Amino acid sequence: MTGVICKGIGGFYYVHDGAALYECRAKGVFRDRGEKPLVGDRVVFSVTDPEKKTGVVEELLPRKNTLIRPAVANMDQALLVVTAASPAFHPLLADRFLLWMARQDVPVLLGINKCDLDKKGRGGEIRRTYGSAGIPVLSFSALTGEGLEEVRSALKGKTTVLAGASGVGKSSLLNALIPDSSMETGALSRRERGRHTTRHSEIFCLEKDSYLLDTPGFSSLDAPEMQPEEVRECFPEFDGPARSCRFRDCLHMAEAECGVKKAAEAGLIPESRYASYAVTVREALARRKY
Ligand code: GDP
Ligand code: ZN
């Protein structure tokens, strides 16, 4: 049989085959080979007890990708949840998350939750900023259900890692998206997800072939180790203004006649994006010196 590892706790791997969840041990051969099954791994497993739903993971199928942060496999995309209300949007955290995902070749969707509370229209500003950075943006309310159909269709047929600071509404979104029927099929149910912070990565089945991975530890992010030139590639909205930089290899930092700095000062590039860029490039340059 084949399935997906939905979570790993205390030496057990919980494998979902599209219909039911099996508690599996991993064969010793993985340890001998130094392989570690990861949440998200597609595996071949054998059933040891069909009643108790237990089994053994026999083989890991080839991975599409392996993320270091979080340590999971086979992610198609990431959904970064932020809010237009409270907790306040933190641009540097969002931009750092985008850098990590770019580094790992994982496309990101930005989800602006709590649009029901957005009286000041802050969501529109976030949407414009990230739209111009080439990031697809969705606005929704996990509470009222507004915009959730678009979220569902963006997640359809994919395995998506869910991220966002505490309090932005990740649990609420999961609960709104996980169908009631998953309880009957033995999939991880909404009940199993407590109101407390997640301690381990866990995959939830939304519908056939659509999975959402809930994972801890995205709230304080350092930047991935990247060269300044790689950081620059992650800010595609700088490309237009960069055509009027005097130097072709301009890093848009201390150079004279920089089109990007001019555009940032004129408000044509969002201030927060230039600030995130500058702080990250400064760190990358400092690393290069040693
Ligand atoms: P998590 O820490 O990211 O999992 O966030 P929760 O799902 O626990 O949500 C944090 C708080 O925000 C809870 O009190 C939710 O009821 C509330 N909340 C979540 N989504 C919405 C929304 O769309 N609108 C409003 N008004 N409140 C929301
Ligand atoms: Zn420049």
Image: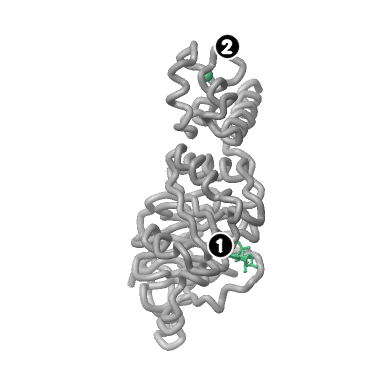
Label 1 and label 2: CA atoms lie apart by 45 Å
Question: In the image, is the residue at mark 1 within 8 Å of ligand 1 by its beta carbon?
Answer: yes
In the displayed structure image, the side of residue 17 where residue 176 appears, left or right: right
Q: Earlier in the sequence, mark 1 or mark 2?
A: 1
Q: In what element is the residue under mark 2?
A: loop
Q: Residues within 10 Å of mark 2 (few under 14, many from 20)?
A: few
Percent x, y for residue 81? 54, 55
Kind of residue sitting beneath label 1: Asp
Q: Which mark is residue 256?
A: 2
State which quarter of the image contains the N terminus: bottom left
Question: In the image, is the residue at mark 2 within 8 Å of ligand 2 by its beta carbon?
Answer: no
State which quarter of the image contains the C terminus: top right
Q: Residues within 10 Å of mark 1 (few under 14, many from 20)?
A: some
Residue drawn at (43%, 70%) of the image: 205
| Relative height, residue 271 to residue 196 (above, below) | above
In the displayed structure image, the side of residue 21 where residue 227 appears, left or right: right
Residue at the disc numbered 1: 116
